[in-house]
Amino acid sequence: MASVVPLKEKRLMDIKRGKLPSGILMRDFTPKGIARALQRGYYRYYNSYINVKKGSVAGVSMVLAAYVLFNYCCSYEELKHERRRKYH
């Protein structure tokens, strides 16, 4: 007999498309819940890419790429005005 897992305890990837809005609304959006979600994501990343027997530069390069993309998004307004300026 299969046990039924409540919608609140399912992973976001396991929720059907029709139940997605109610599944998202059941998540914990308190500061403590958001901190737990960030902590789970950090540990998942660390155990997948950093804490492995044969590591490579893939994990560190992903963090570096995310950092570069974040800084580009933050400074996009200034860069947008720079590219339209004439220097001659």
Image (cartoon, rainbow, N blue to C red):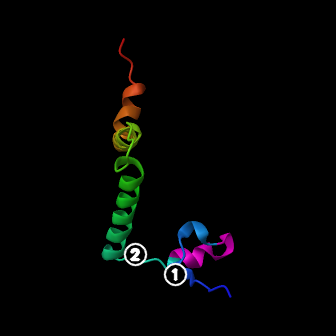
Q: Mark 2 sits on what residue? A: 29
* Figure quadrant of the C terminus: top left
- Please identify the quarter of the rendering in which residue 69 is found: top left
Image spot of residue 27 (x, y percent): 46, 77
The amino acid at mark 1 is Lys
In front of the other: 43 or 52: 52
User: Alpha-carbon neighbours of circle 2 within 10 Å: few (<14), some, or many (≥20)?
Assistant: few
Q: Main secondary structure of the magenta part?
A: helix
Name the residue located 39 percent from the left edge and 61 percent from the top edge. Answer: 41
How many numbered marks, from 0 up?
Answer: 2
The circle drawn on residue 66 is none
Question: Could you classify mark 1 by the number of other residues whose Cα lies within 10 Å: few (under 14), some (14-19), or many (20 or more)?
Answer: some
Q: For residue 7, what is the image quadrant?
A: bottom right
Secondary structure under badge 2? loop
Q: Which residue is mark 1?
A: 8
Q: Quadrant of residue 67?
A: top left
Residue range (magenta): 16-24
Residue 10 on image: x %, y %: 54, 76
